[in-house]
Amino acid sequence: MRFAVSVVVLGVISCAPGGPVTPRPVAGPDLGQIIRDARALADDSMRGRGPFTPENEKAARYLADRLAALGAKPVVGGTMLVPFAVDSRPGVTVYNVVGVLPSKSGATTGRTVGITAHLDHLGVGAPDSTGDTIYNGFLDDAIGVGMSLDVARRYAAAPGEHPLIVMFFNLEEQGLLGSKALVARPDFADVIAKMDLLVGVDAGSPAGEALDWQLMGGLPEHRGTRLADSIAAARGWATVSAPPRAISDVFPFSQKGVPILFPIPGQRWRNYTAMERNQLMRRFDHYHSPGDEYDPAFPLVGTQHFADWLWAIVSEASRRP
């Protein structure tokens, strides 16, 4: 999925229905761990996490272990590695990763909030001008996975009234196949029916703090739309809402009635001119190419903003009755 920018909230949000948004200080995102997770997934040894490969399964197992270390529990099937197969490769098992972090009461069922990012990428393909053939997928979507894990870490430390479901989908690049497979499971139907909000995170974050955002899935307007907009407004950002589109793993959930949000950054960045923004995009945004790999020069201010905004949305949504 295309390069997405980031938002920040330097705290949990307290917001009475219809009232102002006020931050309550909490520990911020762990940028070091976000990058460690993203680099682990986008390392050359992962061979681009291509479909139906041993490295793809290795990535899924890595994420299941990371969730287990945070205290997550299986949602369906007794394991966080949720298998599925597709018509084109019926004999090959592929894994989504699905876990739930208990609420502050210890509950893992009932009304929930969810966050998701996709674990797969394109694998090995045509070489670029340098001869590199590994499509590492650092921004698409290893860093989105890292930010989602950071939200999970913070939730585990400060759980809400409702459990948090964390989902890392496979075969997104092949047409949202992992998400579609999970939505089609009969034993997941009750989870879908009780999911109050699902936030999709895809394509990382650029170098700066975006001031304009599209909330794909924010129309028809729902509680998550208003929540995300109020948090953005408190930081001087503007949002515009749009109907769901089939560009993210949250789309199949919207077709089942789950309120979704998929934030997409706009063109204005704080403290950057349009020319400076475009220069940074050209330098770091190597969409669907071997150049989408870790670069130590990549500025992390956007990552910090996005990760913290995601936490604020999820944290507040999980605290509301």
Image (cartoon, helix red, strand yellow):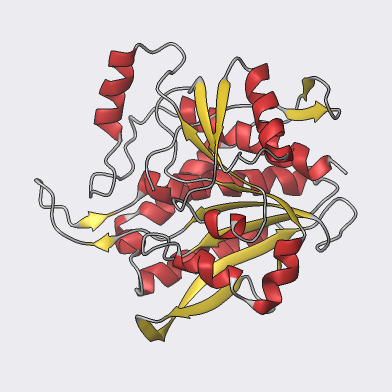
Q: Is residue 308 left or right of residue 288?
A: right
Q: In which quarter of the view is residue 262 placed? A: top right
310 or 149, which is in the foreground? Answer: 310
Q: Is residue 9 left or right of residue 160?
A: left
Quadrant holding the C terminus: top right
Q: Residue at x 60, y 54 (%)?
A: 254
Farthest front residue? 220
Q: Position of residue 196 (x, y in %)?
A: 74, 51
Q: Position of residue 130 (x, y in %)?
A: 10, 46
Query: As displayed, is residue 286 above or below residue 131?
Result: above
194 or 36, which is in the foreground? Answer: 194
Query: As displayed, is residue 88 above or below residue 229?
Result: below
Q: Position of residue 13 (x, y in %)?
A: 76, 29
43 or 253, which is in the foreground? Answer: 253
Q: In which quarter of the view is residue 165 placed? A: bottom right
Q: Position of residue 319 (x, y in %)?
A: 83, 41
Q: Is residue 238 left or right of residue 113?
A: left
Q: Is residue 24 left or right of residue 41?
A: right
Query: As displayed, is residue 90 above or below residue 271?
Result: below
For residue 72, say whether it is visible.
no
Farthest bottom residue? 91
Farthest right residue? 105
Q: Residue at x 83, y 53 (%)?
A: 103
Q: Residue at x 77, y 37 (%)?
A: 316
Q: Residue at x 54, y 78 (%)?
A: 83
The tally of labels here is 0
For residue 237, say whether it is visible.
yes
